[in-house]
Every structure is written in structure tokens, then in C-alpha cells.
Amino acid sequence: MARDTLIGLVGKPSSGKSTMLNSLTDANAKTGAFPFTTIDPNKATGYLQVDCACARFDREAQCRPNYGSCKNGKRFVPVMLLDVAGLVPGAHEGRGLGNKFLDDLRHADALIHVVDVSGCTDAEGKATSGYDALQDVEWLRAEIMRWIEGNLMEKWGSIKRRHINTKATAVETLQNQFSGYGSTSSVVQRCLDRIRLTQPLESWGLHTIRQVVSAFVDEKFPTILALNKIDHPDADRCIYRISHTVKDDSKIVFTSAISEVFIKRLVKQGYAHYEEGGSDIITAKEDPEHVYGLKPIVDERLQMRIDTLRDMLFYRWKGTGIVHALQAAARTLNLVPVFTVRNIHTFTNSSTDEGVFKDCVLVRRGTQVGTVLRRIMGDVPIAFVEGVGGVRVAKSEAVSEGRNDILAFKVGR
Ligand SMILES: Nc1nc2c(ncn2[C@@H]2O[C@H](COP(=O)(O)OP(=O)(O)OP(=O)(O)O)[C@@H](O)[C@H]2O)c(=O)[nH]1
Ligand SMILES: [Mg+2]
């Protein structure tokens, strides 16, 4: 059965992981300006914004997702988010909460590394000033690598012997070792393809094993950096250092988790109107016609906080970046929404219910139609598959945005 995409929030203590979880979901995880506020992981549902198929057919008004929601053709598809304990240098050897933290992450599909760019917390999350957060970007990946490498090297002798005795392929042997991280043979295959290894596994030295582990980390745990606390007055230095070192823009987003939490609270209390991912908020002052029926802000301190938010965040950064963080993580996974319907002509699931496009799953671009259906239906046999217009679609065809992404299927042999 399909399971929701799982995105892990990682980073050193106090970088803002739990605040980010709260900003992306309805969770109310404990946050605090001291290390190891979180010990046991917090899991909650966030919603990834994607273009809904209903907009293609002018059926926005009838769109009725079973899970998540759809507003004017923007679909909010559930994804699971996991906020774990902070990681400190040496975690792979058990420092801090070390291995426990890493074990909690095993089933993550992608990671958002929450980096504190205020420079106000050191590598262990303790209060300081002028800390260079670029270091965090470097050591965190190294920790994840050493954890996996350590687990592999511990048993390498027997892994090799077994590999030779059973005449297994490198993919089979590695998958045996990596299945505990929620890996699949295709993940392992992709990582071997990536480094184009020709040597047989039994002759791999440490250097080759490190290459394999590095490729595995990139494949299994694609990571984006959320440069968090951009609202902080000292954030510019770290932002500059990191942006100029990590050249790949698609891997970086700029966030202020605390501002998103603050705005959500204003909305809940009836003081503001806000479109998620928007570049401003509307308060009663900006809504003289009372379109949104907002309460006026009488508290001067609250008004000042909103003014600062506009100056420090909306004016400079065009938003809190929170929605982008999730979208960037989804992009590293090349996720495509696929809509399954019972009736390919009406896009409904029954003749008595007019709601369209009720079901949507996120799959990797290029996944075969047959694999998508297996994820949804398990081993139930599928007689045939239809695409838009009732056209037969082969199970071997690949899905991508706008292509084979609306499917109806008939169960049977
Ligand atoms: N200025 C600013 N502070 C933030 C932001 N996000 C989080 N914080 C603050 O940073 C501190 C740590 O936040 P948490 O969310 O508890 O951090 P964490 O990474 O979950 O910490 P641990 O659970 O200890 O690993 C809290 O005081 C938050 O209010 C932000 O965007 N801007
Ligand atoms: Mg926390």
C-alpha cells in the first residue's frame, strides 16, 4: 500500500527543527532556546502544494480530495514530517543522542537540514555569537556518512565472504545491508550507476566503499538546506558564506520558521489573512472594506512586531520560505502527483458522487504505471489501465507531469 512521503527535519540542537515542524503542520511540538528540547521524534502531516489535475479541465469547483485539500486548482497533498533530536559532531560514535537520532531517520525519503544562520548557536546548539554556520552544513553530512560507513565496515569481512559464497550481485549484497534504511534494490542500483563502478565488490577498498556510501547518502537521503532564522539581524554573514559555497541554488531555501508560526497564530486569532507561501499578510488596516472580517490590532507591541516582520522578512525575502522548503525537498525526489479515478471520463469514483480527482499519490517522475498501481493496490491483479480520453496505457509507461498522471484501472486478470 502507498505510504506518504516522509521528510526528516535534521540539524544541530536549537536550529529550529521543531519550530519548522510546527510551521509546516498543525503540530505543537515543544520548542526552546536550549539544546535537546526534542528527544523523542515528533511526527506530523504537512501538505505539499502541487498543481491539481482539476485545473486542467476547469473542474476546480468539483474537486474533492479524500486526503488534503484543493483550493482553486492548488492541491495540498499530505506528506509526513519527522522532527528528530538535534545532531552534534561525533553523533555517529554515540555523542549527544547520536545513533538514536540517526535510527529515527532511517525511513526518511528526503531530509531538510535546518541550519541556524543567526550565528547565535555553536555546533552543539549552545548560545554563542558570530558562529560560522557553514561548518554545520559540512559536518552534518559527514556524520550521516560515517554512521552508515561504520555500520557497513563493522561487518565488511563477513559481508564479503557471504557475497562470494552466495555468488550474489553487488546490488543484492548491498541491498541486504541497506534495507534497514528503507532502501530498495532500485535505490542501490541508482547509486552504483552514479559512480560507474567496475570492480567486483570483493576487491573494494575503503576508498571505494566511501564512494558507495556517499552515493547512497545522496540517493537515499537527498537533502536540502533550510537556512533558518533569516529574520535575525546578524543572519546575512552566514547566508552569504553558505550561498557562495553551496553553489546549487535548488538545494537552498531561506526560512523563518518562527515567523510562519507567528503568522499562523495571528490568522487563528482573527487578526490577519494570509495565503500560505504568500509575500505579505493582510490585517484590518489593509482591509478597510472588511472583506476578511479581521479584528483590529490595538496592542502597539503586536503592531510593532508585524511592522518588523514586514521590514525584515516580507520586504527583503518575499515570505517566510516555509512552503518553499517543502517544495524544494519534494523537488529533490522528483515527485509527480498521480491522480487515480474510477471513471476516466468523469474523473469521479462513483456515479452518485460528483466529486472529482478524489485520490492523489506522489511518485517519482519516471515511475512505471504498473509500479504506481502496485503501490496503491498491492498485489491485486490489474486487467487494464486507461488514461485521459479512455486511451489504454501500458503498465510499462512512465509517469510525468501531465503525462500518464491521470489513470483509471480495472481490477482483474
Ligand atoms: N529568530 C528566530 N528564531 C527561531 C526561528 N526558528 C526557531 N527559532 C528559535 O530557536 C530556538 C530553538 O528552536 P527549536 O525549534 O526548539 O529548535 P530544535 O532544532 O527543535 O532544537 P532541539 O530540539 O533542541 O534539537 C527557539 O528559541 C526558537 O524560538 C526563526 O526562524 N527565527
Ligand atoms: Mg526540537
Image (cartoon, grey):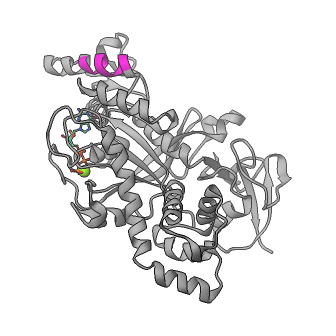
Residue 315 colored magenta? yes
Residue at 22%, 55% (x, y): give it.
38
Q: In the rendered structure, does residue 254 fall within the stretch colored magenta? A: no
Q: Nearer the viewer, residue 372 or 287?
A: 372
Query: Which range is magenta?
Result: 308-316
| 316 lies above or below 195 | above
Task: Find residue 379 and report its image quarter.
Answer: bottom right
Q: Position of residue 373 (x, y in %)?
A: 68, 63
- The percent coordinates of residue 46 (x first, y second) are 42, 47
Residue ID at (65%, 59%):
196
State the image quarter where residue 57 is shown.
Answer: top right
Horizontal side, residue 117 vs residue 399: left or right: left
Please tell me which residue lies in front, 349 or 380.
380
Residue at the farthest right position:
391
Q: Is residue 119 left or right of residue 322?
A: left
Q: Pick the quarter of the image with the C terminus.
A: bottom right
- Count the labels in the image: 0
Q: Is residue 29 visible?
A: no
Left or right, residue 374 beside residue 385: left
Tell me the quadrant of the picture where the N terminus can be found. Answer: bottom right
Q: Is residue 258 above or below residue 365?
A: above
Residue furthest out toward the bottom: 165
Q: Main secondary structure of the magenta part?
A: helix
Residue at (73, 58) in percent of width and height: 369
Q: Is residue 210 visible?
A: yes
| Residue 20 in the image, given as x and y percentages of width and height | 32, 43
